[in-house]
Image (cartoon, rainbow, N blue to C red):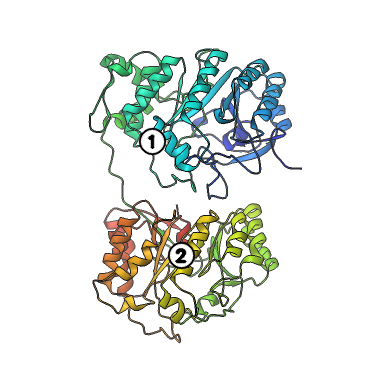
Amino acid sequence: MKQESPTFVKISLAAAMTLGFRTGRFWRDAKMTCVNLLLHYEDGCRANCAYCGLSRSRTAFEKTFIRVPWHVHAMDDIIARLKKSKTARRTCISMLTHPRASDDTLTLAGRLVHETPQSVSVLISPTITDETFLRELRAAGVEKIGVAIDTATPELFDRLRGGGVQGPHRWDVYWSRLAQALEIFGKQNVGVHFICGLGETEQELVRIFQRAGDAGCPNHLFSFYPEQGSIMEYNPQPPLNAYRRIQIACHLVDEGYSHYDNFEFDENTGCITNFGAPQNVLNRLIDSGAPFMTRGCKGCTGRVDCNRPFGNSPPGEELRNYPFEPTGEDIALIRTQIFSAPRPAKRAVTFSIPNTKYYHTDAYSNRGGNSFLGVSITGRECHLLCDHCKAKLLERMIATPTPESLWKMASEAAGHGTKGMLISGGCDSNGIVPLIPFAQTLSRIRKELSLRLAVHTKLVNRPLAEALAPTGIDAVMVDVVDTDVLQRVYHLTGKTLEDVRGSLDLLKEYHLPAAPHIILGLGNGATGCEDDIEHELELINLLRVHRLKSLVLVFLMPLPKTPLAHAEPFPLRKVNRLFAETRRLFPETPIHLGCARPAGAYQIKVEILALKHGFEGIAFPSEEVVAIARKRHFAIRFEETCCALIE
């Protein structure tokens, strides 16, 4: 039987802890007072909102929603625990945009109203509902309605939720449904969700708060949080000082202390310069902590029931919404956040140290580790025997020549702490690693063992893309090289740059997370003019029309007893210019310096250039560059995983 609504729903980790399905403790003993139930269907939500963890085009395997994973539970079990809960004061059904969602929501609402003691709210999907549905919810006993408009302007709405992302939602439909809900449920019983940080100005947010407030709707404010694999995965959260200003503004409007017409804004940036309220009122509100607490549906006592602990951000000093009343110490911290200029972001770099090879320095050691393993599904066999490798790189990898052996190895590795694997192998005569027979096993490993998986193949054809699409793998690495390298070094007679382009297009078509590898030093660029990078830029420009999970640059690493054992290294002047152009062309894409590059002084110089140009990661860094990064006050972290998977 399918575990789908209305018999099953998803609940967040926090809700699972509140109801006793999962063990754990909330930071500072926070309590979750509203259990959110998310409708669940195997084919998911039909919408495609750019920032949402549930969007249909999202590439992440485990689709988090509002920052955390949600797991499926039977409604019978949830209801049994709601009856006994001493913490939950409310339940809220969150609809998806799905053909069955309206009927299933009515079924669930009826059960909750009649079988549990908590008040019931519904976060509706206006696109698939109408006035009749709202009246049926009211008749079923639902007390409050939520409408997630989210964006502050119709232009942003269309770009992030409507035509701009081939989504079904329309601004006018949402406001029309909101008006109908107000007529049926009454003022203060229909809340509106807005998200700060989607590209709006502060002025636009305050204006929309006022529109909702004038209609009689409380504003439920969220801070944008980038969901892995979503279209806006690499967009930053709004600066904390800006979010604190917006929280104050929202509270002032909702509680009637100020009005949009009384605010003042910077004419160039739209930032708030005056809240339109006396300073003593502002001081009193800030000291109360109320503006910084989670905004949501209120109960009969006037307290917020839907406090969503840590939904916008992890616990800690930069907590966005407080799920409890802030203490005096919290208020002092909040005041520094409001009135201090935002601190410049500390430059960060991640040093990836997968267990595919041994790494031991004074800074870090992966000795004895097995967090991330390299696997060859062909053992040491390779049809191509490329000039730079001659299958020597396969010798370091764990051989699993059958799907059964791959599953056995993965199961045992997961039991010993492995978190992920690189799956590759030798290529066939078309430059394809024969992964198709292993696709179901990859899917099983991802789902049952929760290992992160990256696969590496030189090229991709349609049958391979079709096989990999449903597996949930986290990254697909393909080689971005020119026709000369394909034919002369890889021995792929008849293959051209169009085959590389076609591979990238297939990854895009099948929504596979692309982590292409640009390989420097294999072709004529290593010996050409030291200032000419047009040849390499042609390869990089192939990628500009694609949404990449990451972009990895690697170099020929001369191996003994191969035809390229004595090849000249790629000129450093070219490296400098190429790194600069790559960063400029991909300002929001994580760029990594991958595992392969010549050792010695050349390695150190290339790594220094990667730091200089703001690369997000460097694999297996030299001790010298780790020391330089520390001296330059980089925020450093080491991760035992493939660089292509680093967030």
Taking depth in this image into account, of 604 and 276 the one nearest to the observer is 276
Kindly indicate the quadrant of the structure image that contains residue 611: bottom left
Q: Residue at x 31, y 73 (%)?
A: 602
Q: Amino acid at mark 1?
A: Gly
- Crowdedness near tag 1: few (<14), some (14–19) or many (≥20) residues, C-alpha within 10 Å: many
Q: Residue at x 48, y 23 (%)?
A: 175
Left/right of residue 78 with respect to residue 425 in the rendered view: right
Q: Residue at x 71, y 40 (%)?
A: 3
Instruction: Check the image and report above or below for 263 versus 361.
Output: above
Taking depth in this image into account, of 423 and 42 the one nearest to the observer is 42
The numbered disc on residue 427 is none
Taking depth in this image into account, of 447 and 499 the one nearest to the observer is 499
Which of labels 1 and 2 is toward the front? 2
Taking depth in this image into account, of 632 and 431 the one nearest to the observer is 431
* Picture quarter with the N terminus: top right
Mark 1–mark 2 distance (CA, rounded to whole Å): 34 Å
Q: Is residue 488 visible?
A: yes
Q: Amino acid at mark 2?
A: Arg
Q: SS at mark 2?
A: helix
Dot placed on the residue nearer the N-terminal end, 1 or 2: 1
Residue 312 location, x and y as percent? Answer: 46, 35
Query: How many numbered callouts?
Result: 2
Q: Which residue is mark 2?
A: 501
Residue 360 location, x and y as percent? Answer: 43, 67
Q: Which residue is mark 1?
A: 197
Q: Residue at x 69, y 31 (%)?
A: 78
Kindly indicate the quadrant of the structure image that contains residue 597: bottom left
Left/right of residue 205 with respect to residue 128 in the rendered view: left
Residue 432 location, x and y as percent? Answer: 56, 71
Kindly indicate the quadrant of the structure image that contains residue 276: top left
Residue 627 location, x and y as percent? Answer: 31, 61
